[in-house]
Amino acid sequence: MSATDISKITEKSKWQDITPGNQIYAAGTSREFKTGEWRTQTPVWVAEKCKQCLLCVPVCPDSSIPVEHCERQDFDYDHCKGCGICAKVCPFDSITMKEGQ
Amino acid sequence: MSQTVEIRWHGRGGQGAKTAALLLADVAFKTGMHVQGFPEYGPERMGAPITAYNRISDAPIRVHSNIYTPQYVAVVDETLLESVDVTNGLREDGAIIINTTQPKEAILPHLKGYNGRVHTLDAKKISLATLGKYYPNSPMLAAVVAITRVMEQEAFLREMELSFQHKFAKKPEVIHGNMEALKMTFKEVQ
Amino acid sequence: MSIRERLSGNEAVAFAIRQINPDVMPAFPITPSTEIPQYVANYIANGKMDTEFIPVESEHSSMSATVGASAAGARALTATSSCGMALMWEELYVAASNRLPLALALVNRALSGPININCDHSDSMGARDSGWLQIYAENNQEAYDNMLQAFRISEHKDVRLPIMICQDGFITSHAVENIELLEDSVVRSFVGEYEPENYLLNPEQPIAVGPYAVSNYYMETKMGQRTAMNNARQVILDIAKEFEAISGRRYGFFEEYQLADADYAILIIGSAAGTCKDAIDALRAEGKKVGLLKLRVFRPFPAEEIAAALSHCKSIAIMDRCDSFSGNGGPLGAEVSQALYNAHSTALAVNYIYGLGGRDIRVEDFEDIYSRLETIAETGQVTDQYDYIGLRK
């Protein structure tokens, strides 16, 4: 079985095009699914206040705080749903929440 | 329809009436017969009355009900005579075989006027004499073979010896006693 | 060369499992199926097979572990009865909807309450809508033969559904009877190796099993299951044909016994069919045109084939070994009646419930049922359309 192209399985797909048991023959396909548009509030990273303590990274339910070379980067707004947990956990007020996208 | 011998066993949980029925099925199978050996489960408790059955036939057996009009009944524990209707449905042209230390005359009043043949066996005496312990199974099995004649006694002894050799491969010293119990039963059963 | 043996139904199924030598068997004991994992554990301990046996803490876990093993790519099965199956309920549906080809050796036992260890079909019949294939046995031979065919059907690429191999608790599971066994090598080449196309432990192709499917996907998924169940019809017949070639024993959706010219027919599942056959022989000797349809495959349900086989009958007793408490009859009664209706059958049909909680059914009971069927056909009147057989009243 070749890897499932999840862009071809949509809410318009006929039953014949749904894989048996809904199995998905691919890994990491949730990357293709942009949940960022669900956001009603948006976290803003204030880089100059950030001490890179990385407390915000593990608490993010959507893995939307990328880390490179041991330092967090700006938010992955394609997937961040704006829950605000990162802002709550930040000890240095370096994440603020703004209304809307 | 072919001839099927039907046997009902009465015993108490833990005494091995079920095992005896399965052993009889086993040995009859080895002499080329079609067999059924099955228990009827009530309360699964030590000492509770239990019933087991055998059908032995020269043709395949299809029926899967219990046995209501057996040709033979084997009673492994005489105390059951008080509480269980052991002759219920027993055919008059058949026989009942009872393990008891009492003489036949003392048993008859408990059999509700059963007019068929009544056989008794003191399995305890035989078991203690040959095995030094009380296992009513082997003597009762031999008595049932002797009375029902579902197989030749010699074929029975031959198959049982093979079976004991297999079962007691790690304690061959008990094989002789078990065989003696069977042979003594053939002489003692009345 | 077949091997002449005498085994209980549980021994026969365990023997089949040893010959199949599946990859994984998680199990939790419950009467009357306990002996199956017990014998398998013995075989493993004695080096006769190398299945990974997982002792678990409940049936919820045994089916979960079977599901997990199957998703991982293993050939897996478990065994249970009655309340054990009830505790697997959630996983039964998970196994079917995830399209996992795994097996359950079910020893039919009444569900509580009142608590009862003896046979009826309330456990598997309750799970009739779970999406599992269900095959039933009359005796130890059929339980063995069905077990050997199970994985071939279940794993077929057009099917990929879990399969339940059912036999009657105590009546066949604990009864020692003659049986013909196949040689290990014959079984091994018949069953073959399991080579799943996709599985979790395949590093070449990562997959996800059991994703969330919202309303927009759920019905399409169910249609996939339904289609697989439908595909199983031909697969079951094809595998039966292959099995006949190695065993000489013929299987289909059902067995017809003296049915071809029968005016009065009984339709039944399981061990009581043998008892019914003895009644038929006795009545045929008196010139009565009586016959039997013994259903082997209940899922998928061979509705058209059943209706065709019964099309010439004047009256039919559909026998259920469980009550559905619909107030109208048992599950088999409902489905066979539907099949007859859709085929425009004019036969008069009754639905009799028998054998609940191990209540015995005798040759005489079947003779009585045939006599009732004769009266129904002669008078054209159906009284007691839905009745209990062997009830004290």
Image (spheres, coloured by chain):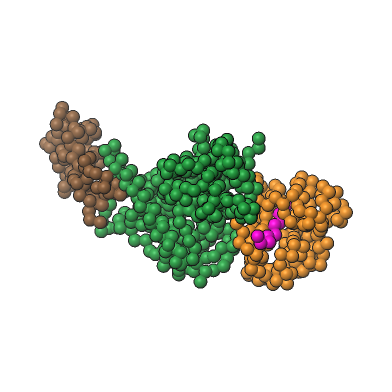
Chain colours: A brown, B orange, C green
Query: Is B109 left, or right, of C60 in this rendering?
Result: right
* Residue B9 on the magenta span: yes
- Looking at the picture, does residue C101 appear above or below residue B154? above
- Is residue C83 shown in magenta? no
The region drawn magenta spans B1-11
Q: Residue at x 78, y 60 (%)?
A: B123
Q: At which x and y percent is residue C343?
A: 42, 44
Residue C87 place in picture, x, y as percent: 47, 43
The quadrant of the image that shows the N terminus of chain A is bottom left
Tell which of C33 and C53 is nearer to you.
Answer: C33
Q: Position of residue A52 (x, y in %)?
A: 18, 41
Quadrant housing the C terminus of chain A: top left
In the rendered image, residue C329, in percent from the top left (x then y), is placed at: 51, 37
Q: Main secondary structure of the magenta part?
A: strand
Residue C281 in view (yes/no): yes
Residue that appears at 63% across and 47% down = C367
Look at 70% across and 57% down and name the residue there: B6
